Image: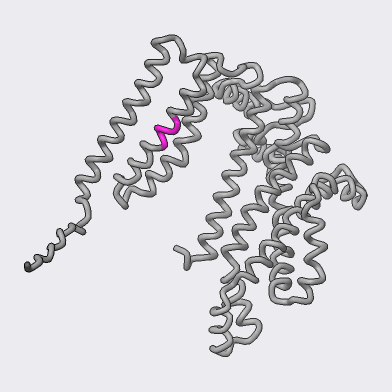
Amino acid sequence: MTEVAAKPVPVSTEPVPRSASQAADRRAILILAAAIVALNAVLAFVGLWIPFAWLAILASFVLVVMICERLGRMVPLRRRTAYERALAFGFPALVLLLWQFSAQMGLINPTWFPPPTRILAGLWDMTVRYDKFSQTSLIGRPWLIPEYFGRDGLAGVWTLLSESHVLATISRVMIGFVLGSIPGILLGVVMGVNQTVRLMLDTTLSAIYVLPKIAIFPIVMLIFADPFGEGPKILVVALAVFILMTINTMAGVRGIDRVYLMAGRNYGANGWQMMRHVIVPGAMPVIFAGLRIALGTAMIVIISVEFLRAKQGVGFITFYYWEVLNPEKMYAGLLVVMMLGVVLTYLLQWLQRRMMPWQR
């Protein structure tokens, strides 16, 4: 009896048409959106929304994430950047709306967690008000610059700027950041290429790194003739940045692919050419990652220092309004700190794009 060989059933390997995939995503988005509405409506109808509010909010958040994932698959490439920015700024806006709603519904205590509208009102009052007792203001009253310049020239403008809490904090951070990052990068490169220096300093740097930087602030104050001036505040920021940048730069140099080093030597590059064209560009991504971490650390350190020993600065006014039990303006001070962190981070990313054009 002759056996008949079974022919294999052909399997289609063609991809699903994009239109069909988008139609499926649209249906899924509608179903998920209906689930969010139904979940909250049912809980509200049976009178259980308040007791299970946070569970409902968590479930709704998970469903919103699933909706955004499907929306992301439908967004064309030319609008991808706009979609990503919408996610980046839309989520904080959603959190603020939830905060406002929770305070109004009594889900959180509005006395200690005031709604964003009250915080913004406190921020506006801090911005326009001039404290005659301390002779300070939040941003230095820039709307008075023409008047002061016409009356006293540049000295009058400097008088306005010197009263600003924001500029006081930024100047301390930026000066300490520059003073700490430049020598930290240089030492990190040396430790990365020279094993002797690395073995001599690695243990010491590791020991200093784990010390809370605010703990060495009293020691730093002993170094200066004016322990309550700007010098100790800037130096403690510079020390924190220096340690971070040294360790990160050393790791970046040691992590360079050996193929690049061999290629540089094969092309006859000398020591300086290897440093300029191979080692520093190769370590640049890790260096900028370290700069971003160091910038955040610098902000944390200076705010902590201003809590303890300052009469001007964003940290000082935040701690002051905590002492006088004014939560709206305390949160407004924290909001200013976060805004400064975002602005300085974007400036650092702009600098990274300029110094690393090959990553575009």
Name the residue: 44% across, 9% down.
Answer: 47
Q: Identify whether 290 is placed above or below 146.
A: below
Q: Which residues are magenta?
A: 61-65
**The residue positioned farthest toward the front in the image shown:** 1
The quarter holding residue 191 reads bottom right
Where residue 39 sits in the image (x, y, percent)? Answer: 38, 21
Name the residue: 53% across, 19% down.
Answer: 102
Picture mark count? 0
- Inspect the magenta stretch and tell me whether residue 63 lies in it: yes
* Residue 32 seen anywhere in this rendered image of the structure: yes
Q: Identify whether 45 is placed above or below 180.
A: above
The quarter holding residue 273 reads bottom right
In-image side of 335 versus 160 (left or right): left
Where residue 181 sits in the image (x, y, percent)? Answer: 70, 60
In-image side of 213 versus 87 (left or right): right
**The residue positioned farthest toward the left in the image shown:** 1
In-image side of 128 versus 105 (left or right): right
Q: Nearer the viewer, residue 294 or 48?
A: 48
- Inspect the magenta stretch and tell me whether residue 32 lies in it: no
* Residue 179 seen anywhere in this rendered image of the structure: no
Name the residue: 51% across, 30% down.
Answer: 95
Where residue 124 sits in the image (x, y, percent)? Answer: 60, 26
Q: Nearer the viewer, residue 142 or 217?
A: 217
Q: How is the image coloured?
A: one colour
Where residue 205 sits in the image (x, y, percent)? Answer: 79, 61
Name the residue: 92% across, 49% down.
Answer: 222
Quadrant where the C terminus is found in the figure: bottom left
Q: Identify whether 165 is placed above or below 251.
A: above
Question: What secondary structure do most residues of the magenta stretch adopt?
Answer: helix
Q: Identify whether 212 is placed above or below 274.
A: above
Quadrant where the N terminus is found in the figure: bottom left
